[in-house]
Structure formats: structure tokens, C-alpha cells
Amino acid sequence: MTDNQEKVRILSGIQPSGKLHLGNYFAMMNPMIKAQETSLLFCFIVNLHALTTVREGKILKKQTLDAAKDFLSLGLDPEKCVFWVQSDVPEVVELTWILSCITSMGLLERCHSYKDKVSKGLIPTHGLFSYPVLMAADILLYQSRIIPVGKDQKQHVEVTRDIAERFNRLYGDTFVLPEPRIEESVSVVPGIDGQKMSKSYGNTIDIFSEENIMRKRIMSIVTDATPVEAPKDPEKCNVFKLYKLFASPEEVAELDRMYRQGGTGYAVSKQMLFEKVKAYFKPYREKRIELEKERKYVEDVMARGAEKARYHASRTLQKVRRKTGLIYKKY
Ligand code: ADP
Ligand code: TRP
């Protein structure tokens, strides 16, 4: 057995459907970057999923490369993990069809994400409806066990597990059953309006936005109308919730004390938050600016990643083809 085979397989993906933000960073990107040290990590940019919402080729192309650059700037090391763009491994599309044929409509009809997206005005296409099957194929193709995600993706990982169980029952043990890994403290990072931060809600604070834009976004975080001099409840404040993600326990305790005693306005805590976010991402921002000029390097990294991913994907798919009877020739 090689070293890699003994390590637990961790996998997660992110859609290149807009600029990556603090919610993406804390729930998915940061846990993934940390995991590359101890696991066999599969990290990818899910551009096929993004087709459900991005309808301009030029934009999808740019956002795909930008997401790759973001990950590399934030410390993802392509030598330590498998990092690729989803559509570079077409095996996933074949597995999606095979899984679709054993996935009941009822299972997909119960998915909140589809209903939420349609209620927010997204076009109810077949792709949007069957999105969880493509996600199941992503996970099962790489035999991954742990899936680091935010809370909104929990149901999709559970659906994947159901599909895997059904396949294993029908065709014999084939797929590893995955489980979501959700870090409670960052399971739902609030946006500037207090709802879940999301690219599709226009309420994000982006990891690599210009500093003046980042400051403006932070200054526009929605707070209540408690006067400056009055005591404030930190647990109800969106600025405080975000500050907790960046500050040390002592610094959090200090802001907690300032809120509770009164006399601190939200403009002060917003400025404190801005300083923290700026300092936290400073070294990564420098790397990000460098990578902006290195398109060829980034493309080469993704091509090598796709090759590694394809090696794993084709092994699983071959097994599936054999078990389902798709390989019909004896010789
Ligand atoms: P978005 O909602 O911005 O389009 P994605 O659907 O691409 O984000 O999510 C990528 C990953 O980031 C997923 O694991 C998702 O659960 C996580 N995530 C996104 N937004 C948040 C948030 N506000 N809080 C916690 N996790 C989040
Ligand atoms: N559906 C996920 C999201 O919107 C992205 C995704 C696609 C994913 N395939 C995946 C996440 C596989 C984890 C594992 O955020």
C-alpha cells in the first residue's frame, strides 16, 4: 500500500459563479487548505455546476481561472493535493447519468437548495434540479469519505450517501459512503445584510476585493438602531459575528466587554473588523497579485491536476461500467 492509499480522502468543490467570499473561505477553503497536510485531498472548481447559473462563456472562463488563482494564493499546494477543474475530467458526466438512473425523483424533489434557488428567481432547468446527482458523481468518483462544506450543502452530501447506498445494494459494494464535515462556528457566515453570505444574494465581503471596496462593504453591514451610549448584545450583531472569525479570544472578549458596557458605536467595531480582515489577508493578497500575471503557470497547474484526478476517476468508472453491464465485450 502506498502512503496515499492509507490517508483518508477528503473532497470538496466550489462553484466559479462569482467572486469568492468570507463564507466560502471559512467553511470550505480554509478547512481544505489545512487538510492537505494530513489527508489525500481532492479540491476542484465545479464549473459544470456553475453552468446552472452562469450563462456567459467569457465570464465562466474568467471566474474559473480566478477561483484557481484564489485557492493557490491562499496556500493550496498542488504538489500536496489533487486540484483541478471539474470539466477537465469528463468521466464525471458518465457517472452522473448512471447514478441518475437509480435516483428517485422523490429524493431530488425533497432538496431544499433547488426550491430556494427557484424561489430566488433562478431558472428552474433540468440541470438545476439534477444538480445533486452531478455532485454525488463528484464525490463518489473519487471514493471520498469526508466532505468539508457549509451547512447549506449538508443535504446534498446526505443525498449522495443515499445514492451510494442504493448503488451498493443493487450492484454490490462499490462506493465509499461519504459524510459532511461542518465546522459549527463557521457553518453559516452572515453577509452584510445578516442573511447567509452568498454570491447569489449580493451580500458578500469578497476575499480579494480592493481595500477601499472591502472597507465600504464592512461599513455597510446592517446593525440595529441602538444608540452609541447604550449597551449592546454582541451575539445579535453581525459585525461581532464576523469579528469572531478573525480576532484572538482576548480581542473577542474585549469587544464583548465594550459592547456590553455601552459607549461603543458600530462604526468603531466595523473599523476594528476592517483592520482585522485587511491584516489577515495581506500576505495572500500579495501572492494573488503576483498570480494575476501567471496565467500560463495556473493553466499548467490545472492541467497536471486534471491528469491526476482522471487517474482516480477512471479506476472507479471502470468498476462501475463493469458492474452495471456497460462493458459487454468478453475480449
Ligand atoms: P455561494 O452560496 O456563495 O454561491 P457556494 O455554493 O459556491 O457559495 O459554496 C461553496 C462552499 O462554501 C460550500 O461548501 C458552501 O456550503 C460554503 N458556503 C458558502 N457560503 C457560506 C456561508 N455564508 N457560510 C458558510 N458556508 C458557506
Ligand atoms: N454544490 C456545492 C456548492 O454549491 C459545490 C460542489 C459541487 C461540491 N460538487 C461538490 C461540494 C462535491 C462538495 C463536494 O457549494
Image (cartoon, rainbow, N blue to C red):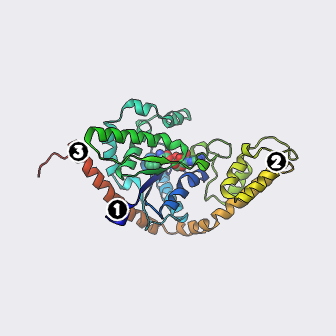
Q: Earlier in the sequence, mark 1 or mark 2?
A: 2
Badge 1 vs badge 3, beta-carbon distance below 8 Å: no
Ligand 2 neighbours mark 3 (CB distance < 8 Å) = no
Q: Say which of 230 and 284 sits in front.
A: 230
Q: CA distance from mark 1 to mark 2?
A: 55 Å
Figure check: 273 above or below 111: below
Badge 1 vs badge 2, beta-carbon distance below 8 Å: no
- Looking at the rendered structure, the secondary structure element under dot 1 is helix
Residue in the image at 61% along x and 53% along y: 22
Looking at the rendered structure, the kind of residue marked 3 is Lys
| Residue 20 in view | no
- Looking at the rendered structure, the secondary structure element under dot 2 is helix
Rendering coords of residue 2 (x, y %) = 33, 65
For label 2, the crowd category at 10 Å Cα-Cα, with few meaning under 14, some 14 to 19 and many 20 or more, is some
Residue in the image at 36% along x and 58% along y: 309
In this figure, which residue is indicated by the disc labeled 3? Answer: 323
| Residue 281 in view | yes
In this figure, which residue is indicated by the disc labeled 1? Answer: 307
Q: Say which of 82 and 172 sits in front.
A: 172
Rendering coords of residue 330 (x, y %) = 12, 49
In this figure, which residue is indicated by the disc labeled 2? Answer: 260
Q: CA distance from mark 1 to mark 3?
A: 25 Å
**Is 284 displayed left or right of 105 in the figure?**
right
Rendering coords of residue 24 (x, y %) = 56, 52
